[in-house]
Amino acid sequence: MTQILDKLSLYLEYPFVRYALLVGVLIAFCSSLLGVTLVLKRFSFIGDGLSHVAFGAMAVAAVVGLTDNMLIVMPVTVICAVLLLRNGKNSKINGDAAVAMISVGSLAIGYLIMNVFSKSANITGDVCSTLFGSTSILTLSKFQVWTCIGMSVLVISVFLLFYNKIFAVTFDEGFASATGVKAGAYNLIIAIVTAVVIVLSMNLVGSLLISALIIFPALSAMRVFKSFKAVVICSAAVSVVCASLGILVSVVAGTPVGSTIVAADIVMFAAFSLAGLLKRGV
């Protein structure tokens, strides 16, 4: 145990490890806030769908040769999020069918583009690192760190500023509209913020694991707590702890960052499920 702590203290002296921890905690915190709303609105799978959209956009950016792929990835993901979350009820293809269609289509087209047009000598490695996360979280520049901090502060500010409206739209959109709340506008805000969080999360856990970062902390908190506020606070705490633990374990043990964070989330979910059973006296 002492050797592990000594090793951790040694690694924490390096700026890249501190950058990874800071970015990881911020992304996990933002994901947990949106996760509670998405789970309650029965859009848990949207993280997976939008992450595949982002993967397809990243493939296009790589082929075009853009040094900053955010110029394509962010707007494309935001547009798809708006279409899915805001207009889903008014379209002929809605709900999980629309998410599945966009998810599979974007993933297939992105992989096809990378195979046909990419000039990279290691296409398989590029695809795997994008889908399952890579060590890029440990090679962040100061500009990337500050960009993530700025976007995270924006997401957190929007959530806190519109907390009551988001709460109303989450539980009963029809009633919220009847009381004068502009449900469409707040659904649009939720869609945009969700897209931003998903794009930020890709470097941390990869396209295929983003849903876990959004869903597991919320579901863990719901095993024990029932009020919206308590669930949000607990979800944020669980997400931050799991992200920190996952990054530190991956640095020390050399395991994949994204997979290690998700494994920590799974263990935490099992622990909270057991705590919920004990609380109900089963």
Image (cartoon, rainbow, N blue to C red):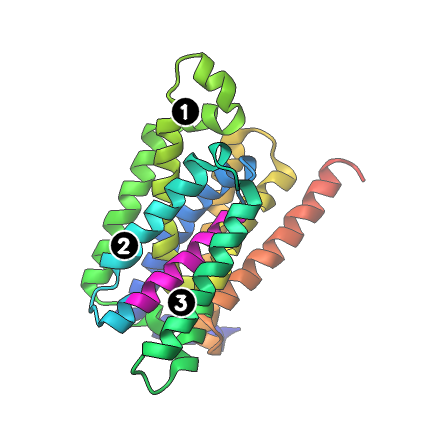
Coordinates of residue 92 in the picture (x, y in percent):
52, 38
- Residue type for callout 3: Gly
Which residue is located at x 39 percent, y 37 percent?
190
Q: Position of residue 251 (x, y in %)?
A: 42, 73
Q: CA distance from mark 3 to mark 1?
A: 33 Å
233 up-or-down from 151: above or below: above
Q: Which residue is mark 3?
A: 110
Q: Quadrant of residue 278?
A: top right
What amino acid is at disc 1? Answer: Ala
Sequence-wise, the earlier of marks 3 and 1 is 3
Q: Residues within 10 Å of mark 2 (few under 14, many from 20)?
A: many
In magenta stretch: residue 59: yes
Task: From the image, tell me which residue sits under label 2.
Answer: 148
Q: Secondary structure at mark 1?
A: helix
Q: Is residue 217 visible?
A: no
- The nearer-to-camera label among 2 and 3 is 3
What residue span does the magenta drawing correspond to? Answer: 45-60
Disc 1 and disc 2: Cα gap in Å? 28 Å
Reading the image, the residue beneath label 1 is: 183
Left or right: residue 38 compared with residue 278: left
* Residue drawn at point x = 20 percent, y = 69 percent: 67
Query: Residue at image x 33%, y 46%?
Result: 79
Where does residue 55 sit, x and y in percent of width and height? 39, 63
| Near-viewer residue (208 or 184) | 184
Between discs 2 and 3, the one toward the N terminus: 3
Report which quarter residue 18 is drawn in.
bottom left
Magenta stretch: includes residue 266: no
Q: Residue furthest top?
A: 179
